[in-house]
Image (cartoon, helix red, strand yellow):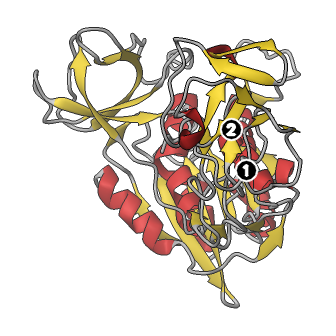
Amino acid sequence: MIEYDEALRLVLEAVPANALATERVPLLDAIGRFTASPVVSDRSYPPFDRATMDGYAVRLSDLDSDRPIAISATIFAGDAQRSYDAPVRLMTGAAVPIGADCVIPREEVDESQGEVISLTPKARVSAGRNIARCGEDLKPGELIFPAGTQIDGTMIGLLAAIGESHPLCSVSPRITIVSTGNEIVSIDDKPQPTQIRNSNAATVQAFFKRMNVPVQRTEHLRDDAASATPVLEECLHTDLLILSGGVSAGDADFVPGVLHALGVQQIFHGVAIKPGKPIWFGYRDVDRHRTLVFALPGNPVAVQVALPLFIEPLLRRWHGSPLSSNLYLPLVGEARPDTRRMQILPGRLISGPHPGVEILKTNGSGDIRASVGSDGLVFLERSWAPGDTVRFRLHGGGR
């Protein structure tokens, strides 16, 4: 049995380098995908000096006297930019004439005389006021996102603004999911007293859906090595194979033996975490293609834990993306560390005068309901003592 950080290091070392092809993806289908090349600005943003309010573009020298100001024109958003020769009325988003010093909001002028205005006592005038300068947000060729950035909804508007209608993304690895167990039935079935519905397959598929990674194939196997072997041989023709169940030390736990017989090299079997101790990881190389294999415990909570702890970092490394960062926070409330293994527990962020994270109440490592309403996972180290901070991983990885 090895420590979690060592297990994760071995997983990341096994990820094939530069193994994924690239493709252009329609922008709205790119959420969750990873950029395969740097994304740079195609021009200055704003592309011109832009008015940030409805108002009047003036030179400061036009305001040297108390005389009313004659307005020479009205400029709308989208009108061609002109050189300044006299004060103009302009709308939010319009190009400020070249040579104008500031934009005075309409609320700060007296417009009662039509095309002749005067400043009110509340008018505030200073160079650059209410003007977004050309290129102050982005310069032409400026790096916006490096390769390996996972696209999320906050980035779509920016990508659209720079004309990235089909960003270049790395192709998602092929994923196969296999659940095992004689006691498992479909989620549509009515289980018998000793049967349970297949929540693990749904959990794993939901994880990949959130990551915008299509699942190539799903299977369910009974606890029988002979019938499972040919199916698993077929399932190994993929990039990542994830099994659940059949991986502990019981008489029905056939998975490690079958994987060994099929030529899958074991890297580790057993990690010092709770839940998830029996996790198995290995790979098979055939004709210069590597298939990574995870065999997870059948405990549904262990599956929920393994996905963010192992599979998400693996996918990020595959795509050349930085790993999600952890938070280190004060622990609010009591905790009982396990002297044998690091506990992975559902946690909720606490705000207020004493911010931190609290561990949600559970009925043990198999409590499938415990994570509902949590913000992430608390890593409760064996050596934790009151007053120590805890490592905390937000659901969805955070950034």
Q: Amino acid at mark 2?
A: Ala
Can I make out residue 289 in this image? yes
> Residue sitting at 40 percent across and 58 percent down?
8
Residue at disc 1, secondary structure: loop
| Viewer-nearest residue: 59 or 316 | 59
How busy is the neighbourhood of tag 2: few (under 14 within 10 Å), some, or many (20 plus)?
many
Contact between labelled residues 2 and 1, with CB atoms less than 8 Å apart: yes
Q: Amino acid at mark 1?
A: Pro
**Residue under numbered circle 1:** 97
Q: Which mark is residue 57?
A: 2
Q: Which mark is residue 70?
A: none
| Viewer-nearest residue: 216 or 347 | 347
| Residue 217 image position (x, y, % from top left) | 84, 54
Residue at disc 2, secondary structure: strand
Up the image or down, 326 lies above or below 366; here it is below
| Residue 32 image position (x, y, % from top left) | 70, 49
Which residue is situated farthest in the bottom direction here? 287
Residue 258 located left or right of residue 249:
right
> How many numbered marks are there?
2
Can I make out residue 181 in this image? no
Residue 301 located left or right of residue 355:
right
> Residue sitting at 52 percent across and 12 percent down?
122
| Viewer-nearest residue: 78 or 164 | 78
| Residue 352 image position (x, y, % from top left) | 31, 9
| Residue 25 image position (x, y, % from top left) | 85, 61
| Viewer-nearest residue: 94 or 12 | 94
Q: Label 1 vs label 2: CA separation?
A: 7 Å
How busy is the neighbourhood of tag 1: few (under 14 within 10 Å), some, or many (20 plus)?
many
Quarter of the rendering containing residue 170: bottom right
Residue 393 located left or right of residue 117:
left
Up the image or down, 164 lies above or below 385; here it is below
Mark 1 or 2 closer to N-term?
2
